[in-house]
Amino acid sequence: MAMRSVVTFHYTLRDPSGRVLDTSMGAQAVTYLEGAGQIIDGLDEQLRGAAAGLKTRIVVPAAKAYGERDSEQVQPVKRSQLPVEGELMVGDQFKTGDDSHAPTVSVISIDGDEVLLDANHPLAGIDLTFDVEIISTREATPEELRHGHAHGADGACSG
Ligand SMILES: [Zn+2]
């Protein structure tokens, strides 16, 4: 079986206009097991074999990041069916259920009792640019390979 690495890196994520969407700088670096779906596919693929100390820019097309926008994910619903108390505004985002995996939707428009909701991921349809610095890499432990995710520096399993 091919060796798989656990990689720790810092990143700054920008949209195609150069606007910073997210960064790990000044916060905790990200640690992941290669090929385990812990980070977006396009980034995982392009970081294969990267060595500690590498600083690089990686562009991930939308299809390999959060997917293309899907017009079927934009749907009208009745205001009374939404799990939101109080006033609803265009641009509001909320989860459609209590479970942590429930999709987040955005309000596109409100017309009387009819609310148009968009369930696309906010980054769907956007090509993402990552400025990456690899902090460290090491061989995954047998336990990490069994679990399908990276463990912390102290070997602790996060779930
Ligand atoms: Zn684990």
Image (spheres, rainbow, N blue to C red):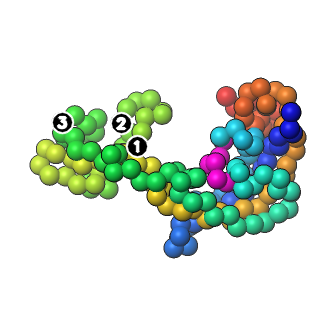
Indicate left or right for 124 with 82 as reference: right
Q: Which residue is mark 1?
A: 104
User: What's the CA distance linking mark 1 and mark 3?
Assistant: 18 Å
In the rendered image, the quadrant that contains the N terminus is top right
Residue positioned 62% across, 48% down in the render: 40
Marks 1,3: beta carbons within 8 A: no
User: Quick one: 6 or 67, which is closer to the camera?
Assistant: 67
Q: Which residue is mark 3?
A: 80
x, y percent for residue 121: 45, 49
Give the class, few, some or many, for how many residues have Cα within 10 Å of label 2's Cα (few <14, many ≥20).
some
User: Quick one: 86 or 44, which is closer to the camera?
Assistant: 44
Q: Kindly identify the amino acid type of the residue bearing the numbered disc 1.
A: Thr
In the rendered image, the quadrant that contains the C terminus is top right
In the image, residue 139 sits, relative to residue 68, either above or below, namely above
Residue positioned 64% across, 53% down in the render: 42
Q: Kindly identify the amino acid type of the residue bearing the numbered disc 2.
A: Thr
Magenta stretch in the rendered image: 38-43
User: Quick one: 58 or 95, which is closer to the camera?
Assistant: 58
Q: Earlier in the sequence, mark 1 or mark 2?
A: 2
In the image, residue 147 sits, relative to residue 58, either above or below, namely above
Q: Which residue is mark 2?
A: 96
Q: Is residue 28 visible?
A: no
